[in-house]
Amino acid sequence: MTNIINLTDSYKLSHWKQYPKGTEKIHSYMSSRGGEYEEMVFFGLKYYIGKYLSKKILQEDVLEASKLAICHGVPFNQEGWEYIVNDLGGKLPIEVKSIKEGETFKQHQVILTIENTDDKCAWLVGWIETLIMKLWYPITIASKSRAVKEMLKGYWDRTSDNPEGIEFAFHNFGDRGSSSVESAAIGGVAHLTQFKGTDNFNCLNLVKEYYPEYQGFSIVASEHSTVTSWGREGEFDFYENYLETFKDKPMIACVMDSYDIYKAVDFVAIGKMKDKIESNDYPIFVIRPDSGEPIEVIGKILEILKNNRVKWRRNSKGFIVYQKYRIIWGDGVTLEQIDAVLSYFCNDYYELSAENFAFGSGGDLMQNINRDTCKFAIKASAIKVNGEWRDVYKDPITDPGKKSLRGRQ
């Protein structure tokens, strides 16, 4: 089991000796000092409290951390931690207040405060800051997903009659590209605050334990290894077998660029494959190109579908919706790329509804972010010494953007 005492920065181990004599309370807050998104989504606190801060501290935890600190060359507050173990039953005397999970907030808004509830443990507020700061990760992923959804909503409102479909228009492909099993899980659930489509199966246990209000869904999909296992000469046999094997599913996705994507798309959009797919007995067939320049590749795929006269209809807004074919792009996907693709094809020339398209993102969604994407910080803003509250703040002349708030928030 993780020793919670060790989940801090080395330099914080000496801070209990640095506060003014008579310090009884410390009050800190968390906010975004700016960054990429004007509005963000608060998410993840329930997990970090439940997984870590609600666990009781044991004597063996104190002894282990003490030995590590000595070997590491830093002092250790043995008396303080043993007080928590022996007098407080191992429970952390900390009060954390926050806005609601899933709620949006703006830059510079206080989203969370931390304060000790026992006068002998003011030093603990700073100690747990390192763990609480990890909220930047799920918040930033949820906020990025929200930004994508807001952009998608413009296209869907203009071109689609199926508003619920947007919940599956941005799929999470990010588990394998995540930095750890845990980051994949918490980041995967953060994405589910905005969308329901995910291939991050790992995150579902975390959903069940901490966030049952969110649900994730996926569909049957192939990958290059399953296609190429049939050999180049057996590629089309794979498509036939794949369609028959999963004919009872409502929708299946098929990666088709293992060799020649244009020949592959032509095969599934003519003859008996087309007849089967367009019948009521077979699922919607999602074509997945996975390489090349997206607008060029998608454009050629659409030309093949047009030449093969696949069935389509016009919705009430005058845009074309393919009856049984869709396209998902999942290679190097960013918000800007999605916008470019939809801007190109959901126009007066192609007249395509946005619901013909979906996108999957892995590395960009889950890893192309850091704490400074939204400039998150936790800062002490008040301290109570010998019964009196004092303001605590920083105001560096070299960077006015790092000026912190004063007083209890």
Image (cartoon, rainbow, N blue to C red):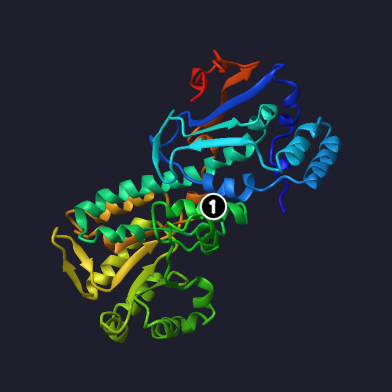
Which residue reaches farthest top? 397
Identity, as a three-letter code, of the amino acid under mark 1: Ile
Say which residue appears at 43% left-offset and 67% top-offset: 218
Q: Which residue is mark 1?
A: 186
Q: Quadrant of residue 310?
A: bottom left
Say which residue appears at 52% left-offset and 81% top-offset: 231
Residue 74 sits above or below residue 191 on the image? above
Query: Total of numbered circles in the picture?
Result: 1
* Residue 346 locus on image (x, y percent): 23, 55
Q: Residues within 10 Å of mark 1 (few under 14, many from 20)?
A: many
Residue 101 appearing in the image: yes
* Secondary structure beneath label 1: helix
Q: Quadrant of residue 76?
A: top right
* Residue 309 locus on image (x, y percent): 21, 75
Which residue reaches farthest front? 87
- Taking 163 as reference, is 110 left or right? right
